[in-house]
Image (cartoon, rainbow, N blue to C red):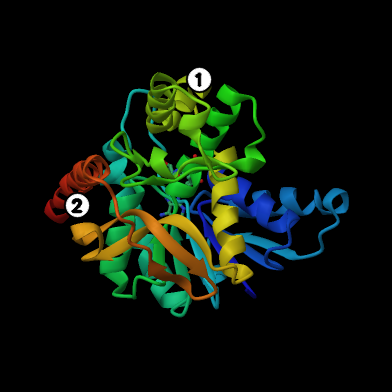
Amino acid sequence: MKKISIVGAGRVGETTAQILAETELCRDIALFDVREDVPEGVALDILQSAPFFKFDGVLSGSNDPHILRDSDLVIVTAGFPRQPGMSRADVLESNVRIIDQVTDHIMTHAPNAMILVVSNPVDTLTYRVAQRTGWGRERVFGQAGVLDASRMASFIAQETGFSTRDITTLVLGGHGDTMVPVTRFCTINGVPIAHFLSKERIAAIVERTRTGGAEILALRKNSSAYDAPGAAVAAMVDAIANNRRRLLPCVALLDGEYGETDIAMGVPCILGERGVESVVTLDLNAEERADFQRSAQAVRIDIERLNML
Ligand code: NAD
């Protein structure tokens, strides 16, 4: 990709920019934010780490949305993070206004871009961006499950003492308390985690995954998570930039898959240079299906609220 823009030069936006620059996933990275001078400052700060990491790409920042022009991919991290005690849905009203404005900027300045939504509530806001742009689902998608799966993998690693390199996890559904960690597909180098962990320990890991974001928020107090979220976004960018065609859980618009239509939520997708190439439909068992439907119901409540705003 020739150019990637990041909207929102806050914590998640900055972390993402730093990783993308360091790993040279793109040589032209632009940051846009409404806070005066901040995106320039962030870009300059990251550029000054270049001699350590030996990257030589271009980073720029601006309060002018023209900076988005000709982006191949726009990553949207603009918006309020939740405060301790709040759910992701609690920031819907304020963030939808921001996301609408940002979407209009992208349509004006980067009409051929793909859009990766990070701002919360990410399922509902991905849906909103898809509705507002009218662009196909391959070009408008969101990040949630890559982060949730990495949280789960790190909990399994802590519990078993095994390397995270060998741990594969899958988390579907909405990016909230109803998310669906699918333990049947969680393995340690192909060996189901049930071989190593009791039912009770697995249930505890599932619960900790569901509340993983809130746990960090409660500990950090004045910030929600951004290190792992930035890394999760970078993993998705890597899949796109290098056309890896990875199977990753993405927030995608559903068109009948998993029995759901007119909704965006986390499902396994093939992610490559054209964005979401396809949604992979898994044969869920009755319990997993019920959990997925419950999660879809929670996302729908937000979408209905959105439609009334
Ligand atoms: P932050 O407050 O550090 O940064 C948000 C930035 O958005 C700020 O710099 C703000 O000035 C900017 N902004 C606000 N309105 C804007 C507009 N109209 N145009 C451009 N920029 C605008 O917050 P953060 O910790 O970086 O989190 C950002 C968002 O990402 C939040 O909604 C948070 O909940 C979400 N998030 C999502 C995930 C995920 O997995 N999907 C993970 C972490 C955080």
The reply to whether residue 224 is visible in this rendering is: no
> Reading the chain from its start, which is encountered first: label 1 or label 2?
1
| Left or right for 94, reference 106 | left
> In terms of secondary structure, where does tag 1 sit?
helix
Q: What's the mark number on residue 219?
A: 1
Q: Which of the image's four quarters has the N terminus? A: bottom right
| Left or right for 71, reference 96 | right
Viewer-proximal residue, 301 or 3? 301
Viewer-proximal residue, 177 or 22? 177
> In terms of secondary structure, where does tag 2 sit?
helix
Number of residues whose C-alpha sits closer than 10 Å to that of mark 1, classed few (under 14), some (14–19) or many (20 or more): few
The amino acid pointed to by label 2 is Ile
Please tell me which residue is depicted at 62% across the width and 59% down the height of the picture: 61
Say which residue label 2 marks: 303
Q: What's the mark number on residue 227?
A: none
Number of residues whose C-alpha sits closer than 10 Å to that of mark 2, classed few (under 14), some (14–19) or many (20 or more): many
| Left or right for 222, reference 181 | right
x then y, percent, for residue 73: 52, 69
x then y, percent, for residue 264: 28, 58
| Left or right for 172, reference 165 | left
x then y, percent, for residue 137: 35, 70
Please tell me which residue is depicted at 53% across the width and 43% down the height of the picture: 229
Viewer-proximal residue, 221 or 182? 182
Please tell me which residue is depicted at 45% across the width and 52% down the height of the picture: 143
